Image (tube, rainbow, N blue to C red):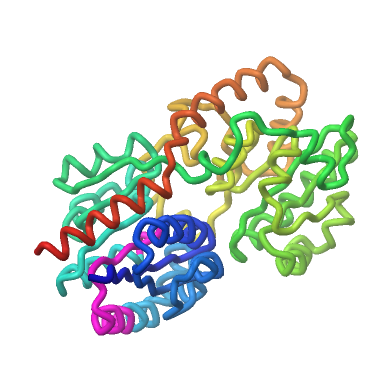
C-alpha cells in the first residue's frame, strides 16, 4: 500500500526541515506519495505542491488577527484536499499555530496527525499543552527537555535531535569561511542579523544600522549584514533610512551559515539563527523588538513564561548570552555588549566550550529519526 503523506510548512526553516525529512522518507519508502503546503526545499526533493508556504507568512498577535478569516478558509480548503487525496498521515513542520489546528481537523477525519517541532510552551502560552495533546498522535521535538512536558498530558512525544546540529561541524573552520566571503583574516568580523521576516527587518533596521556605524567607527571591525534574501536589502534600507553600505556594512544574502562561521561575534534578532550562531561557536548578543501592541498585550496577559527567550540561554539553563528585548534593545546597549565580548577572550572560550557540549547533545540524526517515526505512523494507520 502506497504511503500517502500530507505535509505543511509555514516558513523557510520548516521547509528546510521538511525537505530533509521528506528525502529520508523517500529513501526508506520510495513509493511514498507526499503532497501539501511547500516551499522550494520540499519541492526540490519530490513533494508535490498543493499550496505555497507564503500563504502562512504572518507574525504577531494583532498581525495574525487581520488574517484570521483568510487562514480559516485556507485551512478548510486544505482539509478537503488532503481527505480527497486519501492522506493516511498529516505531518506539520513547525508553524504550530496553524499546523496543529489543521492536524486536529484531519485527525477527526481519520488521518493520523504528526507535528515536527514542538510549540514553545516552555516559553509562553503554557495553557496550550492539553489541547495540543488532544490534537496529535505524535509530536517529534528538536530539544531533549520538551518530550516530558507533553508526555504528562498523555501525548506520544519523542526527541529526534536538531537538524542544524547534524548539518554544522563540531569544529567550524572560521578561516575558510572568511576566505569564501573575501574577508580579512586578521580583523574582527561582526555579523548583524535583523531577522528574516519583513516585520522584523522593519522593526530592527535602524537599530542595527546605528550599532554598526558605532562599531565600525570605534572598534575598526568588519561588519556584515546577513540577510535571508537579496530583496530584503531594499526593505532594510527603507526602514533604516539609508543603504547598509552607508553604515559600513557589507551585505551578504543567502549565506547566513557562512557569515556566522566567519564572524567573531554576532548581533542577532531572536530566532532559530541564534541556535545557528551557537552551533557555529560564535559568541552573540540577542535582541528583539515586537510590535508595540503585541508586546503590551503579551505582558498584560502574562503570556511569557520563560526567563529567557533565546535558544542558547534556554539550552544552557542560564545566561550564556545577553538578551536585549524591547526598550532594552538600543544601539548603546548592543555596542557595549559587543565590546564586552571582544575584550574578554576567556569569556569567549567558555562560551565555545558550552556551545560544543550543547552541539553534541543535539546531533542525533534528526531527519532519519523523524522519517522512521512518521513511517511508523503510516503502519499504525494501515493496521487500524
- Whether the magenta-drawn stretch holds residue 278 is answered as no
Residue 303, can we see it?
Answer: no
* 365 lies left or right of 101: right
Task: Residue lying at the far top in this picture: please name it.
Answer: 346
**Vertical arrangement, residue 92 with respect to residue 193, above or below:** below
What residue sits 29% from the left and 78% below the top?
82
Q: Position of residue 237 (x, y in %)?
A: 78, 64
The segment highlighted magenta reads 76-97
* 7 lies left or right of 154: right
Q: Quadrant of residue 276?
A: top right
Residue 368, can we see it?
Answer: yes
**Vertical arrangement, residue 8 with respect to residue 131, above or below:** below
What residue sits 52% from the left and 58% below the top?
16
Q: Position of residue 320 (x, y in %)?
A: 55, 27
**Vertical arrangement, residue 194 with respect to residue 109, above or below:** above
What residue sits 71% from the left and 26% below the top?
341
What residue sits 20% from the left and 56% below the top?
137
Q: Quadrant of residue 32?
A: bottom left
* 132 lies left or right of 384: right
Q: Position of residue 192 (x, y in %)?
A: 72, 46
Amino acid at each position: 500500500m502506497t504511503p500517502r503523506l500530507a505535509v505543511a510548512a509555514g516558513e523557510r526553516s520548516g521547509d528546510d526541515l521538511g525537505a530533509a525529512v521528506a528525502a529520508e522518507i523517500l529513501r526508506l519508502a520510495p513509493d511514498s506519495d507526499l503532497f501539501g503546503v511547500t516551499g522550494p526545499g520540499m519541492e526540490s526533493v519530490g513533494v508535490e505542491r498543493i499550496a505555497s508556504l507564503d500563504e502562512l507568512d504572518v507574525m504577531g498577535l494583532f498581525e495574525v488577527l487581520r488574517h484570521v478569516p483568510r487562514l480559516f478558509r485556507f485551512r478548510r480548503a486544505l482539509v478537503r484536499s488532503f481527505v480527497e487525496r486519501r492522506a493516511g498521515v498529516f505531518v506539520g513542520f513547525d508553524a504550530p499555530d496553524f499546523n496543529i489546528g489543521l492536524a486536529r481537523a484531519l485527525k477527526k477525519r481519520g488521518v493520523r496527525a504528526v507535528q515536527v517541532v514542538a510549540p514553545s510552551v516552555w516559553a509562553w502560552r503554557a495553557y496550550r499543552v492539553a489541547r495540543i495533546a488532544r490534537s496529535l498522535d505524535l509530536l517529534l521535538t528538536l530539544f531533549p527537555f520538551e518530550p516530558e512536558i507533553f508526555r504528562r498530558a498523555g501525548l506520544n512525544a519523542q526527541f529526534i535531535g536538531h537538524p542544524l546540529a547534524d548539518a554544522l561541524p563540531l569544529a567550524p573552520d572560521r578561516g575558510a569561511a572568511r576566505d569564501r566571503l573575501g574577508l580579512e583574516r586578521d580583523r574582527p568580523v561582526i555579523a548583524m542579523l535583523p531577522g528574516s521576516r519583513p516585520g522584523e527587518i522593519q522593526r530592527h533596521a535602524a537599530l542595527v544600522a546605528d550599532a554598526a556605524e558605532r562599531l565600525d567607527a570605534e572598534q575598526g571591525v568588519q561588519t556584515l549584514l546577513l540577510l535571508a534574501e537579496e530583496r530584503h536589502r531594499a526593505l532594510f534600507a527603507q526602514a533604516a533610512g539609508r543603504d547598509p553600505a552607508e553604515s559600513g556594512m557589507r551585505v551578504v544574502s543567502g549565506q547566513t551559515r557562512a557569515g556566522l562561521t566567519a564572524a567573531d561575534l554576532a548581533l542577532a534578532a531572536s530566532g532559530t539563527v541564534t541556535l545557528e550562531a551557537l552551533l557555529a561557536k560564535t559568541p552573540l548578543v540577542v535582541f528583539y523588538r515586537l510590535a508595540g501592541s503585541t508586546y503590551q498585550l503579551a505582558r498584560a496577559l502574562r503570556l511569557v513564561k520563560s526567563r529567557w527567550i533565546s535558544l542558547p540561554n534556554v539550552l544552557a539553563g542560564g545566561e550564556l548570552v545577553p538578551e536585549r528585548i524591547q526598550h532594552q534593545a538600543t544601539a548603546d546597549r548592543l555596542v557595549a555588549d559587543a565590546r564586552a565580548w571582544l575584550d574578554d577572550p576567556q569569556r569567549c572560550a567558555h562560551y565555545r566550550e558550552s556551545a560544543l557540549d550543547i552541539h553534541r547533545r543535539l546531533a542525533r540524526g534528526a531527519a532519519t529519526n523523524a522519517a522512521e517515526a512518521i513511517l511508523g505512523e503510516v503502519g499504525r494507520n494501515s493496521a487500524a
